[in-house]
Image (cartoon, grey):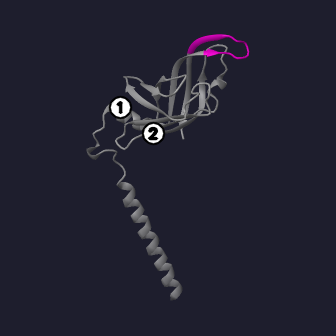
Amino acid sequence: MIKRFNSRSVFIVLMALIVAAGVSSCSKDMLRPGGNLNANQLVAGRLDGTWTTPRDIVTPQSVPPEVFGSMRLVFTTDDAGNPLKFMAHDCPIVFTNATAGNWSVTPTADSTKVSLTSVGPVDDFSIKMASNSMTLSFFMGWENTDTKETGKGNFKVTLTRQ
């Protein structure tokens, strides 16, 4: 009988913990009371998070796709849902000094323009969003350090939400 009582007690405690966890997670769904977010906050909310695994890379002729490295981008938002911090990792050619920049968004009909401060050499780019991926495109000057060839051109890369 003691063994049965212990099993029953453990079951009741586990159920209470599951219910408590479920109730507490429901209280964190809204960014703002009333849910009245503007267009910039809605777009920022979609970008918020970590994006990685570069694929579908497009570069100007003579520029190797390795310029994107193992790119990992992090976008954060504040409690109100506004853009806050931008960080770039493992892509020193595109974002050489992006340990902690700021970002803002300008939504357009078919894409979003992201502007960065305290980041370079790329300080703005366009993004097209899909459910779990985004495609960045930007115009940048470049130099091939092996051949000393220089130029400017369009770059594009697709990243996946981590």
Residue at the (73%, 16%) spot, across then down: 146
Residue extending farthest to the right is 146
Magenta highlight on residue 144 = yes
Circle 1 — which element? helix
Q: Position of residue 21 (x, y in %)?
A: 42, 61
Instruction: Decide which of tag 2 and tag 1 comes sooner along the chain.
Output: 1
Q: Residue at x 61, y 18 (%)?
A: 59
Where does the image place residue 110, in percent across and percent down from the top left? 40, 23
Q: Quadrant of residue 76?
A: top left
* Rendered view: 70 above or below 64: below
Q: Determine the image quadrant of residue 150.
A: top right
Q: Tell me, for residue 76, which label it has, or none.
A: 2
* Front: mark 2 or 1: 2
Instruction: Say what amino acid the circle numbered 2 marks.
Output: Thr
Q: Secondary structure at mark 2?
A: strand
Looking at the image, is 29 positioned above or below residue 116?
A: below
Stretch in magenta: 142-153
Q: Position of residue 159 (x, y in %)?
A: 55, 32
Q: Identify the residue position indicated by label 1 in the image.
A: 40
| On screen, residue 51 above or below 21 | above
Left or right: residue 95 versus residue 63 is left
Quadrant position of the C terminus in the picture:
top right
Q: Foreground: 107 or 3?
A: 107
Q: Residue at point 34% right, 41% down?
A: 80
Q: Position of residue 27 (x, y in %)?
A: 34, 54
